[in-house]
């Protein structure tokens, strides 16, 4: 099975050299193609997962901003409607501290595209300055994320 190069003709040696070189280059090309395929697949998966996590962060931020908008709306409403705020505090105390939904009363402060639910969940009337605990729940635009904020 061993080839004796001394007995081969010049054409046989050339054919043997071409055959052995093309085999090595074919293996090399196939290895490079394999590495390129693996790299392309890994890059694609990394880029697509990055896009999903960015969208997730955006939805969570939208929900957070909605919750904050609900708290700010409730504070503004209470500032300009002191009599109604006093009536809601009385209703909260008479109802044995059951949460009261304030969302319907805040309709004047809601901007287009904002959605939130605001509840009065706590009242401290021991001092002359009352302290109210407000819970605001804000969803993202498509409702996929939700955030609750208490103030």
Image (tube, helix red, strand yellow):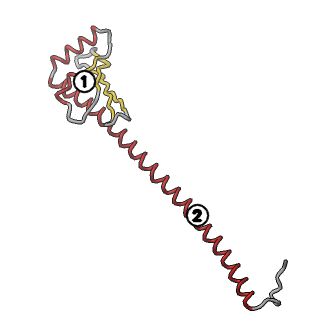
* Near-viewer residue (45 or 139): 45
Q: Where is residue 67 in the image (x, y as percent from the top left)?
A: 30, 32
State whether residue 63 appears in this view: no
Q: Position of residue 113 (x, y in %)?
A: 24, 36
Looking at the image, is 92 positioned above or below residue 104? above
Q: Of circles 2 and 1, which is in front?
A: 2
Q: Which label number is shown at residue 35?
A: 2
How many residues crowd mark 2 within 10 Å: few (<14), some (14–19), many (20+)? few
* Residue drawn where x is 19% and y is 28% of the image: 76
| Structural distance between the alpha carbons of marks 2 and 1 | 58 Å
State whether residue 89 appears in this view: yes
Q: Where is residue 101 in the image (x, y as percent from the top left)?
A: 27, 19
Picture quarter containing residue 14?
A: bottom right
Mark found first going from the N terminus, 2 or 1: 2
Left of 34 or right of it: where is 20?
right
Residue at numbered disc 1: 103
């Amino acid at each position: 099975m061993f080839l004796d190069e001394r007995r081969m003709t010049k054409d046989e040696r050339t054919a043997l050299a071409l055959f052995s070189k093309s085999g090595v280059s074919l293996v090399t090309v196939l290895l490079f193609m394999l590495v390129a395929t693996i790299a392309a697949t890994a890059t694609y998966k990394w880029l697509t997962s990055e896009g999903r996590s960015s969208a997730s962060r955006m939805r969570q931020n939208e929900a957070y901003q909605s919750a904050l908008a609900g708290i700010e709306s409730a504070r503004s409403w209470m500032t300009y409607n002191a009599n109604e705020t006093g009536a809601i505090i009385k209703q909260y105390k008479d109802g044995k501290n059951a949460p009261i939904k304030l969302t319907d009363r805040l309709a004047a402060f809601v901007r287009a595209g904002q959605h939130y639910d605001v509840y009065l969940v706590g009242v401290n009337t021991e001092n002359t300055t009352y302290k109210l605990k407000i819970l605001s729940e804000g969803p993202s635009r498509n409702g996929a994320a939700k955030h609750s904020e208490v103030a």
